[in-house]
Amino acid sequence: MSEYEKMISGMVYDISDRELVSMRTRIRKLANEYNRTDEDEQEKRQKLLHEMFGKCGKNIYCETPIRFDYGVNTSVGEYFYSNFNLVILDCGKVTIGKQCFIGPNVTLATPVHPFLACDRNMREGADGTVRDFEYAKPITIEDNVWLASNVVVCGGVTIGHDTVIGAGSVVTRDIPSGVLAAGNPCRVIRPLTEQDKLKMPDE
C-alpha cells in the first residue's frame, strides 16, 4: 500500500514520501499562481480552480489567497463561494456540497498529529530525510451550509445541510442539519425556522 493510500484511508503515514512531496509541490505552485491573479482574470481563475480541486461544480468563486495541502482530495459542489484566506488541509477527503458559503480566515483541517511526543516528534531517516508521521480524518460539509468568519473545522466532522456555523467557532464534532451552531467547542444554539426568513428583493 502506498503512503498516499494509507493517508486517504486514515492510516498513519509518512509525510516525507516522494509521491506526497510531489503532490504538495504541485498544489502549492498552482495556488501561488492563482493567488497572484487579479479580479479581471476570471477565465484564468476558473481554469486554475478546476486544476486545484479534485472535483468542482459550476459557478464557483474563491477570493485570494487560498491554500491546500493536496487539492485533489477536495471536492466542492456548484455555487460555492469562499472569502479571503481559505485554508484546506486535505490529507483526508474534504467533501463540500452545493450552495456553500465560507467566510474569511476559515480552516478545514483533516490531519491529526499523535498526542504523545514520542510518536509525534520529527525523525531522521538513514538517508538524512527528516520526516514525521500523522493520520487524517475526513470532513463533510453538506449542501447549503454557511461557515462564518474564522471558523475551524476539525477532521472527522460532518456538518449537516442548511446549517450556519457562527464566527470564531471550532467544530470538533458533528453538527446536525438546519441549525445555528457556534462556540468553542461548537454546539447547537437553536434550530433555524421560518421566523429567520427574510423578504428577498426578487420575491
Image (cartoon, rainbow, N blue to C red):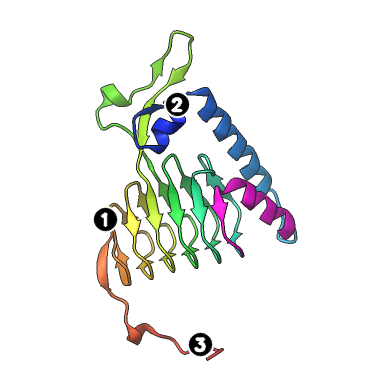
**Is 118 above or below relative to 51?**
above
Quadrant (top left, top right, bottom left, bottom right) of the N terminus? top left
* Secondary structure beneath label 3: loop
Which of pointers 1 and 3 lies earlier in the amino acid sequence?
1
Measure how far apart labels 1 and 3 are at the Cα level. 33 Å
Residue for point 32% across, 48% down: 156
Identify the element where label 2 is drawn. Answer: loop
Question: Mark 2 or mark 1, which is nearer the start of the sequence?
Answer: 2
Q: Are marks 2 and 3 in contact (CB under 8 Å)?
A: no
What whole-number distance in Å separates the C-alpha atoms at marks 1 and 2? 35 Å
- The label on residue 131 is none
Determine whether label 1 and label 3 are within 8 Å by CB: no
Residue 197: x, y in percent? 40, 85
Q: Based on the displayed image, in which of its 4 quarters is residue 21 positioned? A: top right
Give residue 43's position: percent from left, percent from top. Answer: 73, 58
> Residue 2: which disc?
2
Q: Nearer the viewer, mark 1 or mark 3?
A: 3
Residue on which the image places disc 1 = 185
